[in-house]
Image (cartoon, rainbow, N blue to C red):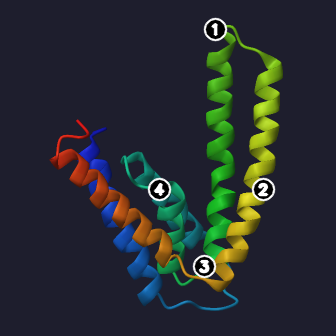
Amino acid sequence: VRNLYLVAIMLILFGIVLINVEKYAKIREKQNLTIPSALTIGMSQALALVPGVSRSGATISTGLALGYSREHSTRFAFLLAIPAVFASGFFELRKGFSGGFQWGPTILATAVSFVIGIIVIHWLLKFITKYSFRIFGWYRIILGVLILCLLYFGVLA
């Protein structure tokens, strides 16, 4: 399924989902996260197994559809990323031991990624308190259309 046509279509489809779920969702203020909602949002991460579907985009869209605010949906999406990132890191670390693993560059890269990640998350949380996700939805749609055009004209195979 790792096919550029599928990636482009999923970019467009979930761009449309992100724009519309934010437009039509009934956001309820001061809403506590319930176990059924948390499980629903967590399971929506599985959509990211389809190429072109963003894990955070799927979880944020689900949170919005369930009535959570942009900020709460985004915070929960980032919290849900922690186990996935750690599991991926440990898997790669295990693979690295079998093929010339170097501790110094790995620790440095991890520390730099962590600091930059915190800065970007902080910026994004400030951004979404003032602006909608519409810009990210349109970005996905434009990128998907661009990929389809490049495939059609033979620039991409």
Q: Mark 3 or mark 2, which is nearer the start of the sequence?
A: 3
Up-down: is 31 above or below 76? below
- The amino acid marked with disc number 2 is Ile
Q: Mark 3 or mark 4, which is nearer the start of the sequence?
A: 4
Between 58 and 130, the one nearer to me in the picture: 130
Q: Is residue 80 left or right of residue 40?
A: right
Q: Mark 1 or mark 3, which is nearer the start of the sequence?
A: 3
Q: Mark 1 or mark 4, which is nearer the start of the sequence?
A: 4
Up-down: is 117 above or below 34? above
**Residue of label 3:** 70
- Whole-percent x and y of residue 63? 54, 74
- The amino acid marked with disc number 1 is Gly
Question: Dot 3 surroundings within 10 Å: few (below 14), some, or many (20 or more)?
Answer: many
Q: Mark 1 or mark 2, which is nearer the start of the sequence?
A: 1
Question: Dot 4 surroundings within 10 Å: few (below 14), some, or many (20 or more)?
Answer: many
- The amino acid marked with disc number 3 is Arg
Q: Residue at x 69, y 49 (%)?
A: 82
Q: Is residue 113 left or right of residue 16?
A: right
Q: Mark 2 or mark 4, which is nearer the start of the sequence?
A: 4
Contact check, label 2 and label 1, Cβ < 8 Å? no
Q: Is residue 37 left or right of residue 1?
A: right
Query: Which of the 4 quarters of the picture holds residue 140?
Result: bottom left
| In this rendering, the label closer to the viewer, 2 or 3 | 2
- Whole-percent x and y of residue 99? 63, 8
Disc 2/disc 3 C-alpha distance (Å): 18 Å
**Residue of label 1:** 99
**Residue of label 4:** 54
Q: Please tell me the numbered disc located at residue 118.
A: 2
